[in-house]
Image (cartoon, rainbow, N blue to C red):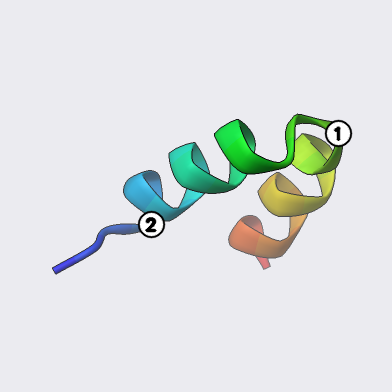
Amino acid sequence: MPTIETIQTTTTIRRPKQTKTSLLTSKR
Protein backbone atom coordinates (compact mmCIF):
# COMPACT_ATOMS: atom_id res chain seq x y z
CA MET A 1 0.00 0.00 0.00
CA PRO A 2 1.77 3.16 -1.16
CA THR A 3 1.34 5.92 1.37
CA ILE A 4 1.20 9.64 0.65
CA GLU A 5 4.80 9.97 1.87
CA THR A 6 5.98 7.33 -0.61
CA ILE A 7 4.20 9.08 -3.48
CA GLN A 8 5.71 12.42 -2.41
CA THR A 9 9.20 10.94 -2.24
CA THR A 10 8.89 9.37 -5.69
CA THR A 11 7.51 12.59 -7.16
CA THR A 12 10.29 14.61 -5.56
CA ILE A 13 12.97 12.29 -6.91
CA ARG A 14 11.45 12.19 -10.40
CA ARG A 15 10.51 15.87 -10.59
CA PRO A 16 12.53 17.96 -8.14
CA LYS A 17 11.29 21.11 -9.88
CA GLN A 18 7.65 20.38 -9.00
CA THR A 19 8.24 19.82 -5.29
CA LYS A 20 6.11 22.82 -4.29
CA THR A 21 3.32 21.78 -6.63
CA SER A 22 3.34 18.24 -5.24
CA LEU A 23 3.20 19.51 -1.66
CA LEU A 24 0.30 21.84 -2.47
CA THR A 25 -1.59 19.06 -4.24
CA SER A 26 -0.95 16.65 -1.37
CA LYS A 27 -2.14 19.16 1.21
CA ARG A 28 -5.27 19.78 -0.85
Q: Earlier in the sequence, mark 1 or mark 2?
A: 2
Q: Secondary structure at mark 2?
A: helix
- Quadrant assignment for the N terminus: bottom left
Label placed on residue 2: none
Q: Nearer the viewer, mark 1 or mark 2?
A: 1
Q: Of the residues shown, which amino acid type is indicated by label 2?
A: Ile
Q: Badge 1, how many Cα within 10 Å: few under 14, some, many 20+?
A: few
Q: Of the residues shown, which amino acid type is indicated by label 1?
A: Lys
Q: Secondary structure at mark 1?
A: helix
- Quadrant assignment, res 18: top right
Q: Badge 2, how many Cα within 10 Å: few under 14, some, many 20+?
A: few
Q: Is residue 1 left or right of residue 2?
A: left
Q: Is residue 25 left or right of residue 20?
A: left
Which x, y percent locates residue 8? 50, 46
Q: Could you say which is closer to the camera, residue 28 or residue 13? A: 13
Which x, y percent locates residue 23? 68, 46
Q: Could you say which is closer to the camera, residue 24 or residue 14? A: 14
Q: Which residue is mark 1?
A: 17
Q: Which residue is mark 2?
A: 4
